[in-house]
Amino acid sequence: MNVIIREYREGDLPRMNEIWNEVVLDGIAFPQTECLDLQSGEEFFGSQTYCGVAEDIDSGKLLGLYILHPNNVGRCGHICNASYAVSGEARGQKIGERLVRDCLEQGKQHGFRILQFNAVVKTNTAARRLYEKLGFVPLGVIPQGFLMKDGHYEDICPYYHML
């Protein structure tokens, strides 16, 4: 596989929706409960500061994506937030790591000073290991901060990374 990370294009939207919706439907990592359709996906991805996609340039297939946007406004507008989604078929191939590394660079390029994750689900150990490997600092635990798809509440762990 020959994977590049690049800015998304309009033609990527159907596949981006598929990948995003796969994570939403899993119900164990994203806070969203509603899936995106072509119109809502175009509005959602278009409203972000930046969206990056992981593309296998040999096949042209998108394997993952991320969104980058402000975490807050005004005096806290220098803090950004991001979310990452990797298709089930591409997990375990370090696509997520490449997306996070690119996101850190894009955050800097877009003038942010800090990347903050508000709600990393405690049981998402692969993501938590990756973030800590890349220098993200855990901020503690918010007990029962995430409603899992099966109806129970799981702890969330906020993280930050200085850009």
Image (cartoon, helix red, strand yellow):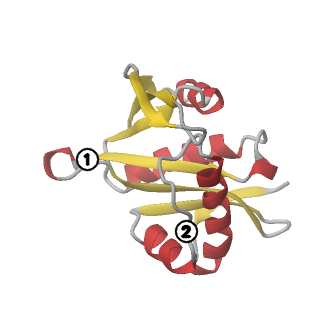
In the rendered view, tell whether residue 36 sits above or below residue 4.
below
Which tag, 2 or 1, sits closer to the chain's start?
2
Side of 62 where 142 appears, left or right: left
Circle 2 packing at 10 Å, graded few (<14), some (14-19), many (20+), is some
Image quarter of residue 162: top left
The kind of residue on which mark 1 rests is His
| Closest to the observer, 124 or 148 | 148
In the rendered view, tell whether residue 43 sits above or below residue 99.
below
Side of 144 where 123 appears, left or right: right
In the rendered view, tell whether residue 139 sits above or below residue 153.
above
* Image quadrant containing the N terminus: bottom right
Q: Position of residue 153 (x, y in %)?
A: 49, 30
* Image quadrant containing the C terminus: top left
Circle 1 packing at 10 Å, graded few (<14), some (14-19), many (20+), is some
Residue behind mark 1: 78
Image quarter of residue 144: top left
Q: Position of residue 44 (x, y in %)?
A: 45, 68
Q: Residue at 37% across / 22% down in the picture?
A: 139
Side of 138 where 55 appears, left or right: right
Secondary structure under the numbered disc 2 in the rendered image: loop
Q: Position of residue 60 (x, y in %)?
A: 79, 70
| Closest to the observer, 37 or 71 | 37
Q: Residue at 51% across / 55% down in the picture?
A: 33
How far is disc 2 from disc 1 in space, using C-alphas? 28 Å
Residue behind mark 2: 36
Secondary structure under the numbered disc 1 in the rendered image: loop
- Mark 2 or mark 1, whichever is nearer to me: 2
| Residue 159 numbered tag | none
Q: Position of residue 18 (x, y in %)?
A: 67, 65
The kind of residue on which mark 2 rests is Leu
